[in-house]
Amino acid sequence: MKVLQFLNVPLVLATLDLNFAELKYLSDHLLPEECRRLVAAAHFKSYMLPNELWQAEQALPKDESCIDLLLHWNSAVGEGRGDTHETLEHRLRQMGRYDLADWLGRTVFHQLGEDLERSLTEGLGDLANETTAADNFSMPTLVPFVEYSDPSGDWGPFDTICLLLVGALIIAIFGICCYTLYLNICGKFKNR
């Protein structure tokens, strides 16, 4: 970084995903009033357009071109620096410029996709030419195939016998209770 400062090369940190060509396209397709409104609205962090938007528009220098306003917003600390294209895209939608908002979103994501593909190609390019020797691989262990069986799904004769015994036991207990209750009631009536 000191080398770039020594060579007097300006180092501009800006939004994360906007480039000069995209900002230039926006400046070419916006009216001067729309551009001033966009830059003024982009200074606010709120979701909705603020009521003080007209004051922010008046605070912008009137002699600067649209591209200069956008570039200043894009690279200034506390403004667009560190943000993404979503700020401008959202404000364009709020202003009714859906065409530019859609274009900006498509273009930025297309560029990000190309950058990602290039990064993967460059990063994996060296690995594609390497070969590995067969002695580096360990052979897989061969385990005999054991068929999995769900024990809850199998119903055998033992299960049927157990179910019948439990059912018979419940019926027998119920019968004994009823017989005891009957004898108890009959005994009370005989004693009267």
Image: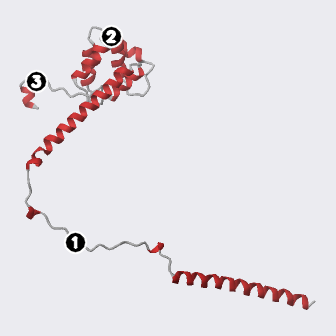
**In the shown orientation, is residue 5 left or right of residue 141?**
left
> Residue 45 at x, y = what percent?
38, 28
Query: Of the residues shown, which amino acid type is indicated by label 1?
Result: Leu
Query: Which circle marks residue 32 in the picture?
Result: 2
Q: Is residue 61 visible to us here?
A: yes
> Residue 91 at x, y = what percent?
38, 23
Quadrant where the N terminus lies? top left
Mark 1 sits on what residue?
142
Q: Residue at x 35, y 25 (%)?
A: 102
| Nearer to the camera, 94 or 159 | 159
Query: Which circle marks residue 9 in the picture?
Result: 3
Q: Residue at x 25, y 73 (%)?
A: 143
Secondary structure beneath disc 2? helix
Dot 2: within a 10 Å radius of its alpha carbon, few (fewer than 14), some, or many (20 or more) residues? some
> Residue 98 at x, y = what percent?
39, 22
Secondary structure beneath disc 3? loop
Sequence-wise, the earlier of marks 2 and 1 is 2
